[in-house]
Amino acid sequence: MKWLIIGAGAIGCLVGGKLAAHGADVTLVGRPRFAETVRQQGLVLTDAQGVQTVHTLQIAASIVEAYQHAVYDLAVFTVKSYDTGTALAELQQAATGHVPSVLSLQNGVGNEETLAAALGAEHVLAGTITTPVSITGPGAITIEKPNFTVGLSPWTAHFPVEHLARVDYDLTAAGFAVTRYPHPEGLKWTKLLMNMVGNATSAILDEPPGRVFADPALVDVEIAAWREALAVMARARIPSVNLGQYPFALLAPLIRTLPNALLRPVLRRQVRGARGAKWPSLHIDLHGGKAHNEVGWLNGAVTKRGATLGVPTPINTVLTETLLTLVSNEAEHTRWHHNHAHLIQACHRAMQSKIAEATGL
């Protein structure tokens, strides 16, 4: 089976590197500088066991270049969500009539829908990965915990069973603990809950999640955002599922009903365990000067689905709109920098507005 990994970030390098190290036929697509570095030095994977350099990867600086040498059975999307459309268009152009099945290991909600609309739902596999990984240099990553867990779920029942079995086999042989899920939206929305925590607030306030979560009022904002997402999932009949060591099927009903005072320490532990000292992705993109941001596929996905279903999402709307304003207007950064009260007040006003709208007051 020939694998094409589209996106040489931390997850793309992890999956491509582990597969290639265990004998799979893998081509990894990254930017020209990355491609040149890995061709010279190999792909360097560091974990608690030591350093491993993988030289068996095929490297390409574009999807078009990758298709000059092979035809692929599976393309794995690990690019940022805002790059999905561009990568998809390049894949369709390069594949020239033989577009492979695709697996999205991207964060957020909406990528599988984009892929299915272009390629057909029967060619799309939803996926999640919960292994924490960081980039330490060009062509080098550090795997922070040895829990190689992957969730897989066909976007439709028409995805070929034998193809799913081959994907599962290769990933398992590479050391990943693979779990198959019957509900693809449940898989992706549960991962969305994980990715939301301490992400937009950290970016808006330019503070690490640990500092954000030291403020009880901001923890309450996070709880409210989670409850909105869970209300949307309930209205859409999307189940929460257990992902790796995270028992969301059990936690979801408790989050919706328990008092905030009991939930705050739970969320603080979640942030410490999932994020550690790492800056979250929305902060990295915003304060790294990126012209785009994935908030539209995280908090924005909650707002979008909520609007369709008639579920109020004032907190996620504030977080999404504020972060998008900061992306487009750098002068706004100073106004929100470390300004807990400003964000808390904005969320409070949005909630009060929704209550007034619902009651007709």
Image (cartoon, helix red, strand yellow):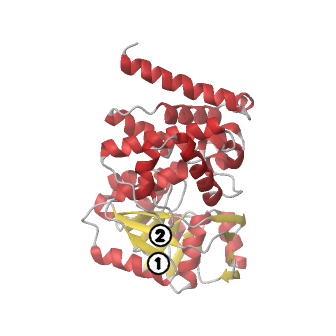
Residue located 64% across and 34% down the image: 326
Q: CA distance from mark 1 to mark 2?
A: 8 Å
Q: Position of residue 95 (x, y in %)?
A: 41, 66
Q: Residue furthest bottom?
A: 23
Tell me residue 286's x, y (percent): 66, 43
- Mark carried by residue 150: 2
Locate residue 130 relative to residue 357 in the image: left or right.
right
Residues 93 and 80: in front is 80
Q: Earlier in the sequence, mark 1 or mark 2?
A: 2
Helix, strand or loop at mark 2: strand
Describe the element under mark 1 as helix, strand or loop: helix
Q: Judge by depth and name the residue closer to the eye, 272 or 104.
A: 272
Q: Amino acid at mark 1?
A: Leu
Q: Residue at x 52, y 81 (%)?
A: 175
The numbered disc on residue 73 is: none
Query: Are the residues flagged by discs 1 and 2 in contact, CB closer than 8 Å?
Result: yes
305 over 239 or under it: above or below: above
Residue 171, disc? 1
| Residue 302, x across and y down, in percent | 44, 41
Q: Quadrant of residue 143?
A: bottom right
Amino acid type, residue under disc 2 in the picture: Val
Q: Residue furthest left?
A: 158
On the rendered structure, is 12 left or right of 115?
Answer: right
To which quarter of the image does residue 15 belong?
A: bottom right
